[in-house]
């Protein structure tokens, strides 16, 4: 859920900031992304729990029993990746918007939406995929602090418990799982490169 939410919101904000370059939307989006990139996730956990749970009483402070328990952990774990994806998407699209082939597409009378989605956004995905692969691995393996503070029964909380109890077999098993997921994420990233950009090809070495 964190990966899906971060990708949709982060890439969406990046596209919007690139299209509205130099406006208050771009400046506000940049300020938001910088703030979420420098503030640790556990700080967001404390702020969200205090404001939303304690002061307002809208959501529970922890657990994983239903949809209302999922909102704050997903939100706290997504804010950092959202900022990173927003910055990479914006910078890649702004650079490509100045390219000659984009000017040619506009000169041919193509609609701006078509130019942005097909000629700009598709070619801007490569840097986003580069940073998104390792980020997806870290999100899939879970956040130690977020899961622990929200009492989410995931691999992150189990890792903290194992470390606290000095359960070395459990620690080694979790490390093996982390390594496997990260390896598969990098492999998936390389495969997606070839699907997104036809210029990328992989051949067997002689």
Image (tube, rainbow, N blue to C red):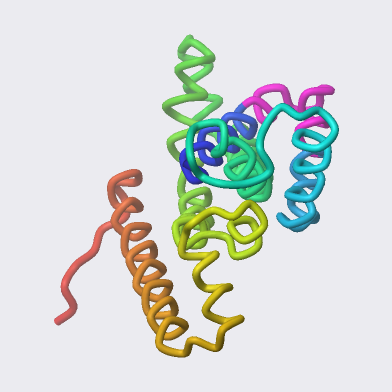
Residue span colored magenta: 16-30
SS majority, magenta: helix
The foreground one among 59 and 155 is: 59
- The image quadrant that residue 165 belongs to is bottom right
Q: Position of residue 68 (x, y in %)?
A: 56, 31
Horizontal side of residue 60 vs 68, given as left or right: right
The foreground one among 165 and 123 is: 165
Residue 91 can be seen in this image: no
The foreground one among 135 and 195 is: 135
Q: Position of residue 31 (x, y in %)?
A: 83, 39
Is 18 a magenta residue? yes
Residue in the picture at 38% in, 62% down: 185
Count of numbered labels shown in the rendering: 0
Q: Position of residue 122 (x, y in %)?
A: 43, 35
Residue 106 vertical placement versus 63 (above, below): above
Which quadrant is the C terminus positioned in? bottom left
Q: Position of residue 59 (x, y in %)?
A: 67, 32
Residue 16 can be seen in this image: yes
Residue 190 vertical placement versus 34 (above, below): below
Residue in the picture at 46% in, 14% down: 108
Residue in the picture at 76% in, 29% down: 57
Residue in the picture at 50% in, 53% down: 132
Residue 114 vertical placement versus 63 (above, below): above
């Amino acid at each position: 859920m964190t990966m899906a939410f971060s990708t949709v919101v982060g890439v969406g904000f990046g596209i919007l900031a690139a299209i509205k370059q130099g406006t208050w939307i771009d400046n506000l989006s940049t300020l938001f992304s910088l703030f979420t990139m420098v503030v640790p996730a556990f700080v967001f956990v404390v702020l969200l729990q205090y404001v939303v749970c304690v002061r307002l009483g809208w959501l529970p402070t922890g657990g994983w029993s239903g949809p209302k328990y999922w909102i704050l952990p997903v939100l706290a774990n997504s804010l950092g990746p959202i900022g990173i994806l927003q910055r990479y998407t914006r910078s890649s699209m702004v650079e490509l918007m100045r390219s000659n082939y984009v000017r040619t597409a506009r000169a041919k009378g193509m609609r701006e939406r078509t130019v942005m989605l097909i000629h700009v956004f598709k070619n801007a995905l490569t840097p986003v995929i580069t940073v998104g692969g390792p980020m997806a691995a870290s999100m899939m393996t879970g956040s130690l602090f977020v899961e622990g503070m929200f009492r989410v029964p995931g691999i992150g909380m189990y890792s903290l418990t194992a470390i606290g109890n000095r359960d070395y077999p459990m620690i080694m098993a979790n490390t093996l799982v982390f390594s496997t997921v990260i390896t598969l994420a990098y492999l998936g990233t390389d495969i997606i490169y070839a699907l997104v950009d036809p210029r990328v090809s992989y051949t067997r070495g002689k």
